[in-house]
Amino acid sequence: MRGEALPTVSVIGLGYIGLPTAAIIARAGMSVRGVDVSQEVVDTINRGEIHIEEVDLDGLVHGVVQRGLLSASSRVEAADVFVIAVPTPFAKDGQHTPDISYVLAAARSIAAVLKPGDMVILESTSPVGTTEAVRDLIAAERPDLRMPGLSSSIPDVSIAYCPERVLPGRILQELTDNDRSIGGITPRCARKALAFYKRFVRGACITTDARSAEMTKLVENAYRDVNIAFANELSIIADAMGLNVWEVIRLANRHPRVNILSPGPGVGGHCIAVDPWFIVHGAPEQTPLIRTARGVNDGKIHHSIARAAELVEVNTRANVACLGLAFKANIDDFRESPARLVAATLARRFGKRIRIVEPYAVELPIEFTDTGAELIDLDTALETCDVLIVLVDHDLFRSVPLAERINKAVYDTRGIWPDQPQPGFEREELRKAS
Ligand code: SAJ
């Protein structure tokens, strides 16, 4: 690559993946134009500021904007490489059908400015076949350009699928250090995309075909969902049998080939609870396990609500602290959060007895309005609430010593307090002892 001019890059979609990706590519010295439909996002980035929370992202974006390597716009303009990082939500049909319209809209806007030699890379999590759909759309819009895989002649443009696999809260580190699957529409496309990613990725970049790369991304998240479902099902079984699930998992995981994940109040976020459906949608007859896992994890939310409500009802006079609203530990993302759903359901049912502790929130989300529930800090909760419902394993909650919660009724959906006496468990121990 020595002596070669660096490509100019356009990143379409400046959300949780697009913006960090754009900033990292810019840091590698390439000139990057970020594109977003929101003028507010565009203006924020052009001021060198950011609109999302992610560790160290503010300093990085500020730096590359200052150095003139990253700018934002609401229009797609000519570039050498186009990276699509737009959302792929569900369609509004209630059937968990993937909606790839944002991807296709991005492809259409790229088609208008595409020139021979350019490369288009899709990063959005997508159902199998989407990269080919992007290619077909561009082929229809630009009959003057030869497309990969449609004829035996050398194509004018390259098209590839390269999913991200980063964890919120560690995005910048994982964007550079994680291995990447790079799926070309043709092997030639994959090699060209590989050369691009090698400029800013330290992890291994492994080439494959586009459909395999699309499926790989979905499989990674479905794998995690199925494994969390196993843990969640165990927790429901343990409740029915009066067992301490954390003790059972801890001991089972001493086996050299067993590694059970952690139960929780359900699975949240925008990936693990969504992506398995893309596989189910593509192969409805072949996916009983993946579909069932989704049902188990969603069912765990209702189980958590029922168990928490029982505890609130039994402790008639007590104030109740729900600990956490985020979809997982130590982040400020409350979207698609089972913790938030459990807390809001309790607030609607029990009103002002419910208090919420969420160190990452400055106010309660909209659905808490008029419920009577209030946002309080952890110290106040420990002073004023006799029932604690742990919904998120934030480090702040983990650090509460036994002495400060020993006399409280606790439902710990995350197992952060293994030393907390478990009433049901103790009864069972006593029964066995007598
Ligand atoms: N959870 C449990 N028990 C566990 C692990 C997680 O209940 O043992 C819950 C979390 O509390 C949360 C949900 O699962 O509600 C998802 O959290 P997560 O940490 O498993 O994953 P995400 O959604 O933050 O990120 C995932 C990652 N995928 C995998 O680990 C296979 C990440 O690498 C992907 O890049 C990301 O999805 C994505 O963008 O697809």
Image: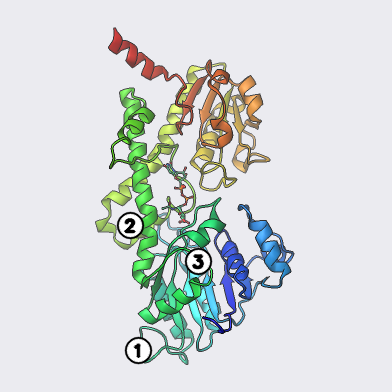
Q: Is residue 345 above or below residue 170?
A: above
Name the quadrant containing residue 162: bottom left
> From mark 1 to mark 3, how far is it between C-alphas?
32 Å
* Mark in front: 2 vs 1: 1
Quick check: 359 above or below 132? above
Task: Tell whether 82 sits left or right of 281.
Answer: right
Which amino acid type is shown beneath numbered disc 2? Val
Q: Which residue is mark 1?
A: 151
For mark 2, what is the residue?
280
Q: Quadrant of residue 296?
A: top left
Residue at the (36%, 53%) spot, across then down: 222
Q: Please, what secondary structure does the residue beneath circle 2 have?
A: helix
Residue 34 % position (x, y):
62, 70
Q: Is residue 390 above or below residue 10?
A: above
Amino acid under label 3?
Val
Q: Using the numbered discs, state the Cα–Cα distance from disc 2 to disc 3 in whole angstroms.
A: 31 Å
